[in-house]
Image: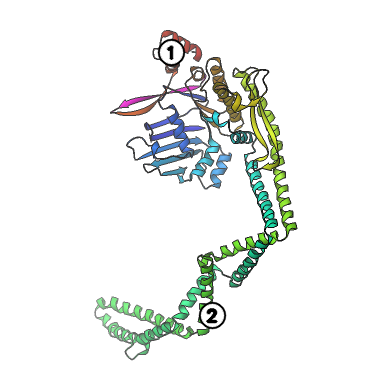
């Protein structure tokens, strides 16, 4: 669950540090006070995209940190270990956005990508926004919600991959049937290019060795001349350096008995004699091994020129030639298959069978899940003052299949008794859509894995008895998960286990958002404000106490 949230210089928040409790918590306050800013800040920590507009006016950077509990042995703990993050008892997500719109992220103190933040966030929290209902009108969102509800998201992704592989082979077969002669010409050219590159047998390691050897052989005469000249100076001339240093050392050595100050230079000369001797020995061996090899040099230069010519032909760096060869071989294999319609058709059939197998498994899961979710949402509609209403998920078969499976998913609703179910977008009014969407979200959250659920003004468009039922639903959900709800309805706030009040205040010409943790008396005043508006009377306070049960 979410334990702490630290916010600095985010929108109208200068600095805020919050500690959260378990159960159902309500975040209330006047419209525009910044209630949803807390949700936006948490979304940023969970990997939401951001730009410089999130910075408070005049600030150089915005910062958000969110600390969650981590259960030992949980999927999150395993994910943290697999991605080389510390898997302690907490998961600390931190996000910083600077004035240029650039952002940095860390997980438990280690640098992280936005993708990693989002992946971690999937284990930690589900955020349901007030505009989520409108997404339910889209066919893709309906399908994604059903797949997520039944745990088939990964299977749907894999099914789409198999579909694309099958269609790729089908397109290849059709192209092969339409233009055999053009492919034959391309195959002939590719065959020649592949043979040329295979004969070249380019290897990155050998390429480096060949270049080094070529440079050495190309300068062999200069190297031999230089080594010989150095040996002459050091040891082979009459005035060789080693002989002169021997003479100097011999003169100093007996004199150290009379003055110890000469001992250090004498020892240095002795050390120099030893090092010069080693240098002379090494140069002698080098000169003996060094040979002028014009034939080998010519061979290397010819090979290097062949590699460079091939690189120029394919317009790549020499090091990229293996990638070019692999690409050409893959295309050649594809054309070879295309030249054999029977083989290509066989591969196409195998790919289609692989797709059908996954798609049928996905369909079976969807059929079972659609029936269960339809019944659960229908039951939720009865609780939300839509007695006699009915929710139904249809699966319309697609004879040839599609990337998303062998059926289209549709949400149908009958808002009143006796009416036939019709597409959600064509039937539901704003208030009905809110209630249906809320029922779907609460049911979907129950089946999810995230321990923290955030509802951001999802109760828009409802009131009265329905609002009280919504509060009861969220309170019940709070027995299993941590539930945070931004709400403007007193009937919902009164059902919460704890409540915060968010308000705006102005200081030195700047506006800030402030959060106040409400005690029992504070909750009475806040619920009374939500009930009574500008002027709070004893009557509204009494009503608030009745709602809160105090």
- In the image, taking residue 525 as reference, residue 120 lies left or right, namely right
Q: Which residue is mark 2?
A: 299
Which residue is found at the position 46% from the left and 78% from the top?
A: 216
Res 521 → quadrant: top left
Lower position in the chain sequence, tag 1 or tag 2: 2
Secondary element at image label 1: helix
Q: Is residue 224 visible?
A: yes
Does 427 appear above or below 282?
above
Which residue is found at the position 46% from the left and 34% from the top?
A: 42
- In the image, taking residue 290 as reference, residue 178 lies left or right, namely right
Which residue is found at the position 59% from the left and 65% from the top?
A: 325
Q: Which residue is mark 1?
A: 532
Magenta segment boundaries in residue numbering: 495-508
Which residue is found at the position 47% from the left and 21% from the top?
A: 488
Q: How far across and down, in percent of the image, does residue 426 sit? A: 60, 26
Does 97 appear above or below 514?
below
Say few, some or many: other residues with alpha carbon within 10 Å of mark 1 (under 14 / 14 to 19 / 20 or more): some
Q: Name the residue furthest top.
A: 539
Q: How far across and down, in percent of the image, does residue 389 sit? A: 64, 20
Q: Name the residue furthest bottom.
A: 238
Q: Which mark is residue 30?
A: none
Res 412 → quadrant: top right
């Amino acid at each position: 669950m979410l334990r702490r949230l630290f916010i600095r210089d985010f929108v109208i928040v200068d600095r805020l540090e919050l500690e959260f409790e378990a159960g159902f918590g309500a975040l209330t306050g006047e419209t525009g006070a910044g209630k949803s800013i807390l949700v936006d800040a948490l979304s940023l920590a969970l990997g939401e995209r951001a730009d410089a507009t999130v910075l408070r006016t005049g600030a150089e950077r915005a910062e958000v940190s969110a600390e969650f509990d981590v259960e030992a042995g949980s999927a999150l703990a395993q994910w943290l270990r697999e991605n080389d993050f510390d898997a302690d008892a907490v998961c600390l997500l931190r996000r910083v956005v600077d004035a240029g719109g650039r952002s940095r992220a860390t997980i438990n103190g280690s640098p992280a990508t936005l993708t990693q933040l989002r992946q971690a966030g999937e284990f930690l929290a589900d955020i349901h926004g007030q505009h989520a209902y409108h997404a339910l009108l889209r066919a893709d969102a309906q399908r994604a919600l059903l797949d997520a509800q039944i745990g088939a998201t990964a299977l749907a992704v894999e099914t789409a991959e198999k579909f694309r592989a099958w269609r790729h082979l089908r397109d290849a077969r059709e192209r092969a049937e339409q233009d055999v002669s053009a492919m034959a010409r391309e195959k002939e050219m590719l065959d020649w290019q592949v043979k040329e590159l295979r004969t070249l047998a380019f290897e990155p390691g050998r390429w480096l060795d060949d270049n080094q050897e070529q440079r050495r052989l190309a300068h062999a005469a200069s190297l031999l001349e230089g080594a010989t000249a150095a040996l002459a100076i050091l040891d082979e001339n009459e005035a060789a350096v080693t002989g002169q240093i021997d003479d100097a050392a011999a003169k100093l050595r007996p004199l150290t008995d009379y003055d110890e100050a000469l001992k250090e230079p004498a020892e240095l000369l002795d050390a120099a004699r030893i090092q010069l001797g080693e240098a002379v020995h090494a140069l002698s061996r080098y000169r003996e091994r060094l040979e002028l090899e014009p034939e080998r040099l010519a061979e290397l230069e010819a090979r290097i020129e062949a590699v460079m010519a091939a690189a120029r032909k394919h317009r790549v760096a020499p090091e990229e030639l293996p990638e070019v060869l692999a690409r050409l071989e893959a295309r050649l294999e594809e054309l070879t298959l295309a030249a054999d319609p029977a083989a290509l058709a066989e591969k196409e059939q195998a790919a289609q069978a692989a797709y059908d197998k996954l798609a049928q498994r996905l369909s079976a899961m969807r059929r079972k899940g659609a029936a269960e979710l339809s019944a659960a949402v229908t039951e939720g509609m009865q609780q939300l003052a839509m007695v006699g209403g009915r929710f139904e998920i249809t699966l319309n078969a697609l004879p040839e299949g599609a990337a998303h499976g062998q059926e289209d998913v549709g949400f149908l609703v009958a808002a009143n008794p006796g009416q036939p179910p019709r597409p959600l977008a064509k039937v539901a009014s704003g208030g009905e859509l809110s209630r249906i969407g809320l029922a779907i979200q609460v049911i979907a959250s129950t089946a999810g894995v995230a321990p923290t659920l955030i509802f951001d003004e999802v109760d828009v468009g409802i009131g009265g008895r329905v609002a009280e039922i919504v509060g009861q639903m969220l309170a019940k959900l709070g027995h299993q998960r941590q539930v945070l709800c931004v709400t403007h309805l007193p009937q919902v706030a009164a059902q919460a286990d704890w409540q915060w009040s968010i308000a705006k205040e102005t200081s030195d010409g700047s506006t800030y958002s402030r959060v106040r943790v409400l005690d029992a008396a504070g909750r009475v005043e806040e619920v009374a404000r939500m009930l009574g508006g500008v002027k709070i009377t004893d009557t509204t306070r009494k009503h608030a106490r009745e709602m809160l049960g105090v």
